[in-house]
Amino acid sequence: MYATYKPRTKILQQHITEYVVLKKQSTDNLNYFAFPHKSGSLALYFKANINIDAAGVSISEAPTPKPLVITLGKYLEPLLVKYKGEITELSVNFTPVGMNYFFDENFARIANKPAQFLTDVAWNELASRLYQSAGAGAGMIELLEEFLISQFRERDLSKAESAVKLIEADKSVKVKNIALKLNLSERTINRLFHKYIGCSPKDFRKIARFRASIKMNSKDANLTQLCMNNEYYDSSHFCKEFIKLTNKNPKQFFQLLTKTSDVGFPYIFLN
């Protein structure tokens, strides 16, 4: 159902983690919960109707060609995604700051909601070209990468990237310490996160801890060890943050994840 591809060129590898192609056949509906992610994503469709509301995102097969592009920003609770009919979706998963290199506008304008439509003409024309001429798979990726390289902007976002790396290296680091290490004010650090990453440093830290826990999890995961290794203060803190981000405590979440998904695609699928 899912196929993943890694960027092929050095410049794209610096800002994009992977491309994911979903080829869903029309025999079944597909519903799942997606969970907060420290990166931003962009998804392209050609024959789809999409409804975005407070409940989540619903994607259904359209009878006539209709290119659509949506961006996924930061969200701090599960996002319900529903598919109906035969759907082909191509997602671009960026590094935490990566999306900013492919637009004149910053992340805060492009993806300031959990999900929203991207009206950029060039990207919507790409959606049409992808599904008309390339089909699914490697041919689609080649066309996508040519377009991404044409859209690349040289920008100096080193301060925002350094702040992200400090949190990823020490998930208990305080904003004031990030500011000291980068010789910036706390206000500037907060502004960088909201502008280029789409959330506060505090919320990014929560998501980073959560995502690291998923990555470390296995069938026989020791929750106490996960708590300690990902720099939660204690088991109560671990549980509280998981409930906020997933609506489940850690034990419930990992049990459901093991039954329905894996660490590559940490979704909880619904019947």
Image (cartoon, rainbow, N blue to C red):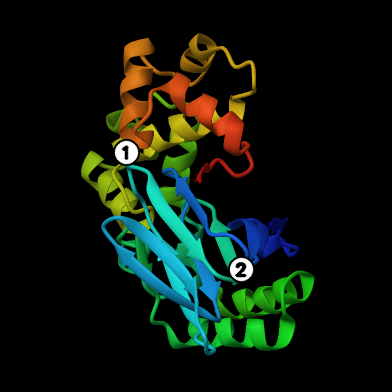
Q: Which residue is mark 1?
A: 203
Which is nearer the eye, 268 or 123? 268
Q: Let me know if residue 154 appears in the view.
A: no
Q: Residue at x 30, y 42 (%)?
A: 184
Which quadrant of the view contains residue 113?
Answer: bottom left
Q: Secondary structure at mark 2?
A: loop
Q: Is residue 111 above or below residue 271?
A: below
How crowded pointer 1 is (Cα within 10 Å; few <14, some 14-19, many 20+) is rated as: some
Q: Is residue 128 above or below residue 26?
A: below
Marks 2/1 in contact by CB < 8 Å: the verdict is no
Q: Is residue 255 above or below residue 92?
A: above
The image shows residue 106 at horizontal and vertical percentages of 36, 66
Q: Residue furthest left?
A: 187
Instruction: Tell me which amino acid carries mark 2.
Output: Ser
Q: Which residue is mark 2?
A: 26
Q: Secondary structure at mark 1?
A: helix
Q: CA distance from mark 2 to mark 1?
A: 37 Å
Which is nearer the eye, 224 or 55? 55
Q: Is residue 151 above or below residue 215?
A: below
Which is nearer the eye, 127 or 98? 127
How crowded pointer 2 is (Cα within 10 Å; few <14, some 14-19, many 20+) is rated as: some
The image shows residue 228 at horizontal and vertical percentages of 48, 12
Q: Residue furthest right?
A: 138
Q: Residue at x 55, y 70 (%)?
A: 85
Instruction: Tell me which amino acid carries mark 1.
Output: Asp
Q: Let me know if residue 9 appears in the view.
A: yes
* Among numbered discs 2 and 1, the one appearing first in the sequence: 2
Which quadrant of the view contains residue 257?
Answer: top right
Left or right? Give the position of 150 relative to 120.
Answer: right
The image shows residue 118 at horizontal and vertical percentages of 40, 75
Q: Residue at x 42, y 41 (%)?
A: 163
Which quadrant of the view contains residue 146?
Answer: bottom right
